[in-house]
Image (tube, rainbow, N blue to C red):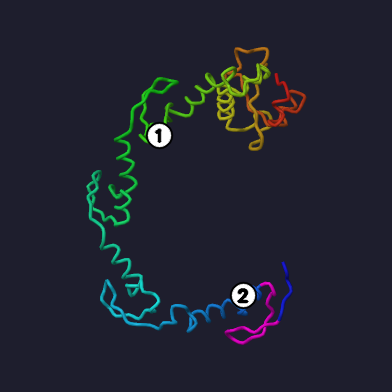
C-alpha cells in the first residue's frame, strides 16, 4: 500500500493538510478531520437537505414539526412520541399462570409469542408440560423438557448417571477408539469415574490441603496409604487415601508424579 502523502486543501475549513495518495485516488482525503467531515455533511451538503424542509403533523401528538423532504418515512416529532405510539399498539393480555395483565407488541404477536408475562411464568408453564422418563442407569423417574425429549436426548437423570453408563457401555471393546486392549489395566482404573470420585472425596475431606507439609493450593494429589497395586481391595476406600502436594508425593515415590506425567509413571 502506498503511504506517500500529498498536500491538499480541506473542503470545509480550507486548511492545507497531508493526505495519502491512495485515499485521494479513491475520492477520499477531502477533509482534514472528522469534525470538518461531519460539519460539511450536516449542513447544506447533506443529501436529505438538498430538497429542503417542510412541515408535517406528528402522528402521535399532532404537533407540527420540520423534516427533510427526503426523509419521507418520518411521521413522529420525537423519539418519545414514537415509543408512545408503539406502546399503544398491540394487545392487552392476561397471563394464564399468574393472572397478571400485560401488553404485547404487534411484532411479538406476529412471532407467535407474548403468551406469558415473564420468564418466571415461562419456566412454570414449561414444567407443567414436562415428559416423565426413566433413567437408563439408576431407573429413577425424572422429568424432561419436551424440546429435549423430541431430539432423543435427556435419557439420564443426572450427569453422574450419564458418566456411569458411558463407562460401562462405551468403554473397552464398545469404544469407538478401541485398539485391541493396548491400555494397561491400571491406567484404565485410574481413568474410571469411580477412581475420579474417590480422588475428589479424599481431597475434599482434607480441605484441599497437603497433610504432610500443610501447603494449600497448587497441584494436589490423592495418595494411597497402602499400595494401589498390592491392595486392590482398598483402591476406592476413602480411609486409604491422603492428600499430598506434588513435591511431597514425588518424595514419597522417589520420582516425578505430577499430573502431566501420570500416564507415563507407574505409581504404586
Q: Position of residue 16 (x, y in %)?
A: 67, 85
Q: Where is residue 175 in the image (x, y as percent from the top left)?
A: 58, 21
Q: Which secondary structure lies at badge 1?
A: helix
- Residues at marks 2 and 1, CA–CA distance in whole angstroms: 55 Å
Q: Which secondary structure lies at badge 2?
A: loop
Residue 203 appears in which quarter of the rendering? top right
Q: Which residue is located at x 42 percent, y 29 percent?
A: 152
Residue 16 sits inside the magenta stretch: yes
- Which portion, as a residue range, is magenta? 7-22
Disc 2 and disc 1 in contact, CB within 8 angstroms: no
Q: Which residue is located at x 41 percent, y 82 percent?
A: 51
Question: What residue is disc 1 on?
Answer: 148
Q: Where is residue 176 in the image (x, y as percent from the top left)?
A: 59, 23
**The C terminus lies in quadrant:** top right
Furthest residue to the bottom? 14
**260 or 182: nearer the viewer:** 182
Front position among marks 2 and 1: 2
The disc, 2 or 1, on the residue closer to the chain's N-terminal end is 2
Question: What residue is disc 2 on?
Answer: 28
**106 or 163: nearer the viewer:** 106
Q: Position of residue 130 (x, y in %)?
A: 33, 33
**267 or 205: nearer the viewer:** 267
**The N terminus lies in quadrant:** bottom right
Residue 48 sits inside the magenta stretch: no
Q: Which residue is located at x 52 percent, y 23 percent?
A: 166
Give the side of residue 251 with respect to residue 233, left or right: right
Q: Is residue 12 visible?
A: yes
**Marking on residue 188:** none
Amino acid at each position: 500500500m502506498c503511504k506517500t502523502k500529498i498536500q491538499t486543501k480541506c473542503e470545509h475549513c480550507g486548511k492545507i493538510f497531508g493526505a495519502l495518495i491512495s485515499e485521494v485516488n479513491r475520492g477520499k482525503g477531502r477533509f482534514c478531520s472528522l469534525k470538518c467531515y461531519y460539519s460539511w455533511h450536516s449542513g447544506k451538503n447533506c443529501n436529505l437537505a438538498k430538497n429542503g424542509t417542510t412541515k408535517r403533523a406528528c402522528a402521535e401528538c399532532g404537533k407540527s414539526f420540520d423534516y427533510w423532504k427526503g426523509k419521507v418515512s418520518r411521521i413522529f416529532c420525537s423519539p418519545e412520541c414514537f415509543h408512545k405510539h408503539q406502546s399503544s399498539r398491540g394487545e392487552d393480555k392476561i397471563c394464564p399462570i399468574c393472572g397478571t395483565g400485560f401488553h404485547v407488541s404487534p411484532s411479538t404477536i406476529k412471532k407467535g409469542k407474548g403468551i406469558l408475562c415473564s420468564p418466571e411464568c415461562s419456566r412454570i408453564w414449561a414444567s407443567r408440560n414436562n415428559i416423565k422418563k426413566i433413567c437408563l442407569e439408576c431407573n429413577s423417574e425424572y422429568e424432561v423438557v419436551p424440546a429435549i425429549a423430541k431430539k432423543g436426548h435427556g435419557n439420564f437423570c443426572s450427569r453422574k448417571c450419564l458418566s456411569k453408563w458411558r463407562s460401562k457401555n462405551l468403554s473397552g471393546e464398545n469404544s469407538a477408539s478401541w485398539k485391541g486392549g493396548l491400555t494397561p489395566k491400571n491406567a484404565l482404573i485410574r481413568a474410571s469415574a469411580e477412581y475420579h470420585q474417590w480422588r475428589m472425596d479424599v481431597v475434599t475431606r482434607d480441605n484441599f490441603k497437603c497433610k504432610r507439609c500443610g501447603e494449600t493450593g497448587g497441584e494436589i494429589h490423592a495418595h494411597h496409604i497402602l499400595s494401589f497395586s498390592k491392595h486392590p481391595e482398598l483402591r476406592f476406600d476413602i480411609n486409604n487415601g491422603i492428600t499430598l502436594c506434588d513435591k511431597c508425593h514425588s518424595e514419597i515415590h522417589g520420582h516425578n508424579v505430577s499430573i502431566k506425567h501420570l500416564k507415563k509413571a507407574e505409581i504404586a
